[in-house]
Amino acid sequence: MGLNELIDSLKKNGQKQIDDIWQAAESEAEILRKQIAEAIADITKIHADKLASACQKSMRAIFSETEVKTRQKKLFAYQNLDQALRNAALKQLPSLRHQKYEKIFAMLVAELPEREWEKIVVHPDDLQMAANFFTANSLQPDSAISGGVLAETANGRIVVDNTFEKRLERKWPQILPQIIAELEKHFEKSGTAEKAG
């Protein structure tokens, strides 16, 4: 074997070793690329899951807060509606005096328990009617009463308020839900609050 052949043989063996090393490096690089891609995919999935979980948690918090605020606004609206309807009802009480009021007044007086009433408070226009049932010196006018009678025993130990105002106050918890249900029904049909009524 000559020097040239030896050099050629070494070149071939060297080239083969270089090719083998290069191929092994490429194989390892490919394996590393796959491992890195899998690691990135895992990290991405973990972060995506965490992000999705955080987003869902945030959305639940936002929806919950929105629901609470909506309920608060609805409650505030119902409170305002309650007050407006109550005021409207109170303004209508004097109109009850126009229909068989003498009979209504007598019924309200008859509902009072048997007592020695020291003070009887009525609307000023009812003083003459009240004199048919009570002693004149016990009668006191009060224009804040739209109808009915307020009776007190000595020292105010027993007070029976059988006025229109008090009867409305007692019945209001039953009346209000019925009115609101009717308004809501009308609102659902018409779609606007202005058309209700």
Image (tube, rainbow, N blue to C red):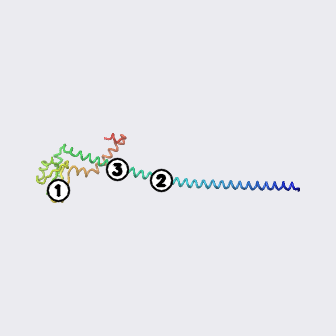
Q: CA distance from mark 1 to mark 3?
A: 37 Å
Q: Earlier in the sequence, mark 1 or mark 3?
A: 3
Name the residue type under label 2.
Ser
Q: Nearer the viewer, residue 146 or 117?
A: 146
Find the residue positioned furthest to the right: 2
Q: Earlier in the sequence, mark 1 or mark 2?
A: 2
Report the disc number at residue 152: 1
The quadrant in which the C terminus is found is top left
Across the whole image, how many numbered discs are drawn on residues? Answer: 3
Q: Residue at x 63, y 55 (%)?
A: 36
Q: Is residue 184 left or right of residue 47?
A: left
Q: Nearer the viewer, mark 1 or mark 2?
A: 2
Position of residue 128 measured from the top left corner of the image (x, y, whole percent) = 12, 48
Name the residue type under label 3.
Phe
Q: CA distance from mark 1 to mark 2?
A: 61 Å
Q: Residue at x 21, y 45 (%)?
A: 94
- Is disc 3 surrounded by few (<14), some (14 to 19) or many (20+) residues within 10 Å? few
Q: CA distance from mark 2 to mark 3?
A: 27 Å
Report the disc number at residue 76: 3
Q: Nearer the viewer, residue 180 or 103?
A: 180
Q: Residue at x 24, y 47 (%)?
A: 90
For the residues labelled 2 and 3, say whether their Cβ atoms are less than 8 Å apart.
no
- Is disc 1 surrounded by few (<14), some (14 to 19) or many (20+) residues within 10 Å? some
Image quadrant where residue 39 sits: bottom right
